[in-house]
Image (tube, grey):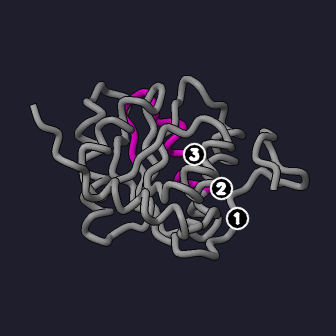
Amino acid sequence: MRVTEPIEPGYDGAIPTPTGAIRRVAVGSDHVGLALKTALAAACCKAGYEVVDVGVHETGRIDYNDVAVDLVRLLTNDKADAGILVCGTGAGMQIAANRYRQIRAVAVNDLYTAYFARSHNDANVACLGARLVALELAVAIVARFLATPFEGGRHQRRVDKLSHPPTIGA
């Protein structure tokens, strides 16, 4: 599979129907990411995913941290299988979501990262930058992220270490 092309040959611009373990997707954004989040949620719904939208729903300023926490609650309480967070760059949402032990959030602004974040790192939250990624590419990134299974094997040991970080002495 080539993961460096912006769009796969034969790709029709839609998110494929869920076939793997991910069927319930939580989505959230700050005010900057509202339009992209709304479009991605609609694309996921159209594909057959169950979508839970944690906000925002208007353009008034909001702290991205609050939205990230709402999405994390859904994942950690088994109310969603994966998450999509959108802010200006994806970085703020990534930092906010990764504060929680069960979360492996990654800023994914290209297909290569979306593929390997899932297949090697078992990432469960994709964070996208609304100021960095056009809608067509964002849909392709989410499609790749949701459709890519975790490979396990040698990667499982590394993912397990993420869930049990070492204590660093002074």
Residue interval drawn in magenta: 28-43
Disc on res. 113: none
Q: Looking at the image, is 114 positioned above or below residue 24?
A: above
Using the numbered discs, state the Cα–Cα distance from disc 3 to disc 2 in whole angstroms: 13 Å
31 horizontally vs 170: left or right = right
Upstream in sequence: badge 3 or badge 2:
3
**Image marks 3 and 2: residues in contact by CB distance under 8 Å:** no
Which residue is identified by label 3?
Answer: 39
Quarter occupied by residue 134: top right
Which residue is identified by label 2?
Answer: 143
Find numbered disc 2 in the image and state the secondary structure of the residue it sits on.
helix
**Image marks 1 and 3: residues in contact by CB distance under 8 Å:** no
Q: Looking at the picture, which amino acid does disc 3 mark?
A: Ala
Which residue is identified by label 1?
Answer: 16
Upstream in sequence: badge 1 or badge 3:
1
**Image marks 1 and 2: residues in contact by CB distance under 8 Å:** yes
- Queried whether the magenta region covers residue 40, the answer comes back as yes
Q: How crowded is mark 2: few (under 14 residues within 10 Å), some or many (20 or more)?
A: many
Find numbered disc 3 in the image and state the secondary structure of the residue it sits on.
helix
Q: Outermost residue toward the front? A: 169
97 horizontally vs 85: left or right = left
Q: Looking at the picture, which amino acid does disc 1 mark?
A: Pro
Q: Which residue is drawn at 51% across and 45% down?
A: 38
- Queried whether the magenta region covers residue 33, the answer comes back as yes
Q: Residues within 10 Å of mark 1 (few under 14, many from 20)?
A: many
